[in-house]
Image: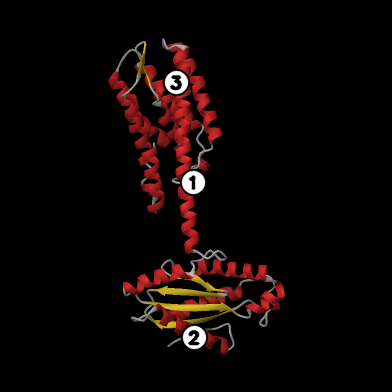
Amino acid sequence: MFLANKISEFIGLKVKKISKYIWISPLLSSLLSLFIMSFPFEDKGMRIDLRAVPLFYTAYLGGWKFGLIAIILPTIYRFYLGGSTTFEGITQGILLPSLIGFLFHKKASFNPPYTIIHLKHMITAFLVLHCIRSVLMLWTTPVTYQTVATRIFFETIGLLSIAVMQNDAKRNILLRKELEFQARHDAMTNLYNLRYFRKKVEEMIKQKKTFVIAMFDVDYFKNYNDTHGHLAGDAVLRTIGKLLSDSMREEDIFARYGGEEFIICFNNVINVQKAISVGERIRTKIESYKFYGEETQPSGKITISIGISGCADGKTLDTLIKEADTALYLAKRAGRNRTEAKL
């Protein structure tokens, strides 16, 4: 299970389409059960082992589909081994743990590869399994009370060990994801920060892609902050970040440049006129949004001014930023709430 958790941790950190790989988990549980069944404790002709632990755990964690996949190989193997208690071994040691696990499965909490197990709920479900299974074993097999008690003890310890390792691995994944997010994103707006923006655009320059850089800032933002306070100003920046995220194409890159300034990379744009058209769409969307307290602004609205660079054409990012910044200055001088470009 340690190996399975490490594989899950790797998938959670490196793989984007998790759905293709989550079925590895029940398969690993199935193989683990086979391994456990190969080293049983013999008592009065009965094979006693901890196969129920990974089978219950898998069905509890992933539901009936995971549970069904996990029980196939152990069921076939137990039937192959034969013996006077084959039926009991399959029903009580394989099918019942999977069934109880499924019945206590929390679908809403299953979020691979980030699922955190609620230990109290899981142990409650496992105790229900123990009660039912122990009664059936004492009733239908020659097993002793001492053997049943020993099995319950070791199975519970085994399940807790798996669950603790699982939660530790998932918390590590979540922590690393959070740290990666914070390293790439601006804390105020949740847009990319300038450092990550530069990294992505520099990669595009190396690939000789065609793009245009745009910069914009909020008109008379200091006036808004002085009138309504910095908390209201922060809310405006967050809203603009959300409007920007909703307006951009998937291939575009955008970030907070600093203060009330934002920067955009329009990818696969072969002429400035197209960039101006996209910029105007963003400008009008922000202008039409009803911001709190915008009536105190000189124009009666929260507006932005946009400056657009020329096409990349082998230029450095700093050169393109300078062109966009110059165009932004021209937009400010021309009266604000407009888009200007370096033609």
The dot on residue 187 is none
Residue 169: x and y, percent? 45, 44
Q: In 3D space, how far apart are the residues under numbered discs 2 and 1 (Cα atoms)? A: 47 Å
Seen at 62% across and 68% down, the residue is 234
Seen at 50% across and 69% down, the residue is 247
> Along the line of sight, which residue is nearer the eye, 315 or 305?
315
User: Which element carries disc 2, helix, strand or loop?
Assistant: helix
Q: Nearer the viewer, mark 2 or mark 3?
A: 3
Is residue 302 left or right of 144 when viewed as pictured?
A: right
Report the quarter where the N terminus lies.
top left
CA neighbours of label 2 inside 10 A, class few (<14), some (14 to 19), many (20+): many
The dot on residue 171 is 1
Residue 194: x and y, percent? 48, 71
In the rendered image, the vertical position of residue 235 relative to residue 75, given as above or below: below
Q: Amino acid at mark 3?
A: Arg
In the rendered image, the vertical position of residue 18 relative to residue 331, given as above or below: above
Identify the mark nearer the N-term, 2 or 1: 1
CA neighbours of label 1 inside 10 A, class few (<14), some (14 to 19), many (20+): some
The residue that mark 2 highlights is: 327
The residue that mark 3 highlights is: 151
User: Which element carries disc 1, helix, strand or loop?
Assistant: helix
Q: Does residue 15 appear anywhere in the picture?
A: no
Residue 261: x and y, percent? 54, 76
Tag 2 near tag 1, CB within 8 Å: no
